[in-house]
Amino acid sequence: MTGRWLALTLALVVLALIIGIVIAPGGGGLALASYADQNLSVLVPHGWRTENLAAPYGTALVGWVDAGNLHTTEVVQATLSRSDSTPPQRAQARARQLRHSATFLEAYLGPVQFYGGRPAWELEYFLHGYPTAVFEFNSCSSTIAMTVTLSASSVGTLDNEQLTMAEDAEPKCDGPAFTSPDRADLAIPLRLPD
């Protein structure tokens, strides 16, 4: 009988952890679903609609929007990295570009740490009064530059989504968008060996 209670208790603890991870912390409780294709895996808020974004070879790009609030979006971009481009440089370059906008208000620019100690750089700002957080980090032994952009209609909504969604975005290092133009372009027939 003790073994059954131990197993039941363990199952309940695991279920509670799963619910705690899948439902983002904060007042709103954002339910997340897993998305994966041949190039990326990402957490996406349940019920958001895809933006069907397209990118050239060397880049994988996916995006979603909350159909009930068009200011709340998620865009994940993975690009073959240039050796002269680091996450801090990319975040600082984006901040410089945005500073030309009259409605830009920078809230934070600096390092953050994802779960497990993985380093990233974050640029958090307001544009036209709406908050946005952009996370820059490298993956696949620094061969792929990751950019996760999250925007929302309020700071509270952005706080519900930002770290969980950004740290779980991952490229598939051997994905077609990063390994071979022939694999990436479905219009090009693959040649079979003779």
Image: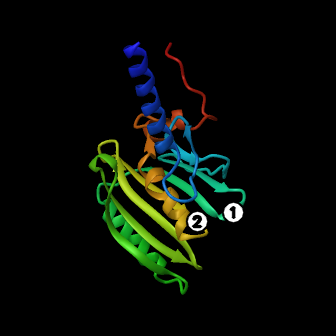
Amino acid type, mark 1: Asn
Q: Could you say where residue 60 lies in the image, as x and y percent from the top left?
A: 51, 47
Q: Residue at 47% of width from left, 74% of height from top?
A: 125
Find disc 2 in the rendering and name its residue. 152
Q: Secondary structure at mark 1?
A: strand
Task: Tell me the quarter of the picture where residue 8 sits.
Answer: top left
Q: Residue at 61% of width from left, 50% of height from top?
A: 54
Going from N to C along the chain, the mark reached first, 2 or 1, is 1
Along the viewing direction, whichever of 83 and 167 lies nearer the viewer:
167
- Residue at the far left: name it: 117
90 in relation to 115, above or below: below
Residue 12 falls left or right of residue 118: right
- Residue at the far bottom: name it: 102
Find disc 1 in the rendering and name its residue. 69
In what quadrant of the picture does the N terminus appear?
Answer: top left
Q: Could you say where residue 103 lies in the image, as x and y percent from the top left?
A: 55, 84
Q: Could you say where residue 67 lies in the image, as x and y percent from the top left?
A: 72, 56
104 in relation to 164, above or below: below
Q: Residue at 51% of width from left, 52% of height from top?
A: 76
User: Could you say which disc has been placed on residue 46 in the image?
Assistant: none
Along the viewing direction, whichever of 5 and 103 lies nearer the viewer:
5
> Badge 1: few (under 14), some or many (20 or more) residues near its Cα, within 10 Å?
few
Q: Could you tell me if residue 145 is visible in this image?
A: yes
Q: Are marks 2 and 1 in contact (CB under 8 Å)?
A: yes
Q: Residue at 48% of width from left, 54% of height from top?
A: 25
Amino acid type, mark 2: Ala
Q: Secondary structure at mark 2?
A: loop
Residue 112 falls left or right of residue 192: left
Gap in Å between the C-alphas at discs 2 and 1?
8 Å
Q: Could you say where residue 102 lies in the image, as x and y percent from the top left?
A: 54, 87
